[in-house]
Image (spheres, rainbow, N blue to C red):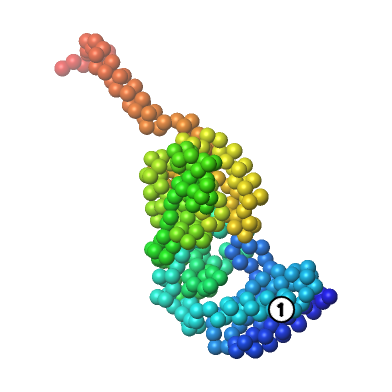
Amino acid sequence: MMNYEEFKEKFTEDLKTNLEAKGHDIASIDIAPSQKLNQDGYDAISVKLENSMMGPSGNFSNLFAAYEKTDDYDLVLNHATRMMDDAISNMPSYDANQLTDYDFIKDKLVLEAVNAEKNASLLEKVPHKDMEDIAIVYRVLLGQMDDGIASVVVTNEMLEKMDITKDQLHQDALISSPEIRPVEVNTLFGTIAELIPDAGFMIQAGGPEDQILVGTVADKHHGAGVIAYEGFLDEQAKKMGEDFYIIPCSIHEVLLVPESMAHDINALKDMISDVNSCEVPPEDILSDNLYHYDSKEKVFELAENFKERIATKEHAPDKEAEKESAVGKLKKTQDKVKEAPKKEHKPKSKDKGEMAI
């Protein structure tokens, strides 16, 4: 069995030969460390095409792991050949200059929510907006492919070449993202019913599942970014008739729980952590934290920060009340002075040295 370096050298040569035999003009095949949003680092294999700015890529670390597990080199090579061939055949083509043409990309911008800590190194290279420990990044959707979408995350380098500010990028993404990925809000009951046709046997309409909302986008892909959509949080507060807590189910959706139903925020946090560790794929985890939206103050914050802020506010002295109280005391004193009997004024006696005229 080949070691990693031997496998890498032979695999890149054989894959290039196979793809050229299928009629593709391959400039090079490279393997280098890579990191995708919300995923751990890995070695990526990238196919560069002649006269094209785009090319398919895949997880080379996984390919080597499959080889180690099966000890079947041809099986892994043929799988990679089919995967890359399909990707190249269905790949949209773009001029190399278009990704630095802001007029071209600004109507293709979408917002995505990712975990800030897990993506710390990548966030140093891309414009983003922080919402507590969630980072909102910007992606350009270039086209639809059979097995997914062709897209690219906007980088600081791209912004510099386009001479665009982060604020302009964000404002334009607020316009384009809801049009490309429109908001979809359903009750938890309705969402469960869509996924499990027989859910009526487990839950009943009119229960708590009818009061909890699920926020995502129409295609259910990277839908948690709706929390950054302009007006989204306020609209949901108006719909519920109260403020709410936000449970980050994954990078694809969020749950909105009315305040009146969230009696124990620690229990909700424990639930989020348990579900993330047991049910959600690592690459889809958004956060282990619980959030709250205060529609009056327009504040999105960690649930514990909300509790602390409210507690501080309740125990803080009421400055206006103190002011009114002081004014009231002063007025009462003035009234007493006015009502008090006035003493008769007596002229002062003259000093002996004075002479009366």
Task: Assess disc 1: are there few (<14), some (14-19) or many (≥20) residues with their C-alpha within 10 Å of its C-alpha.
Answer: some
Pinpoint residue 325: horizontal percent, then vertical percent.
Answer: 36, 25
Is residue 333 visible from the viewing direction of this image? yes
Residue 79 position by quadrant:
bottom right
Q: Is residue 46 visible?
A: no
Q: What residue is shown with label 1?
A: 77
Q: Nearer the viewer, residue 309 or 204?
A: 204
Residue 241 x %, y %:
38, 40
Front residue of 212 and 139: 212
Of the pair 209 and 247, the residue shown nearer to us: 209
Q: In the picture, which quadrant includes the C terminus?
A: top left
Give the image location of residue 204, x and y in percent.
48, 39
Question: Can you tell which quarter of the image residue 49 is in?
Answer: bottom right
Is 328 left, or right, of 99 in this rendering?
left
* Residue type, numbered disc 1: Leu
Assign the N terminus to one quadrant of the image: bottom right
Residue positioned 46% across, 32% down in the render: 314
Query: At 55% from the left edge and 45% from the top edge, which residue is drawn?
Result: 290
232 lies above or below 151: above
Find residue 345 and report its horizontal and vertical position in percent.
Answer: 22, 12
Q: How many marks?
A: 1
Outermost residue toward the right in this view = 1
Asked whether 161 or 317 is in front, the reply is 161
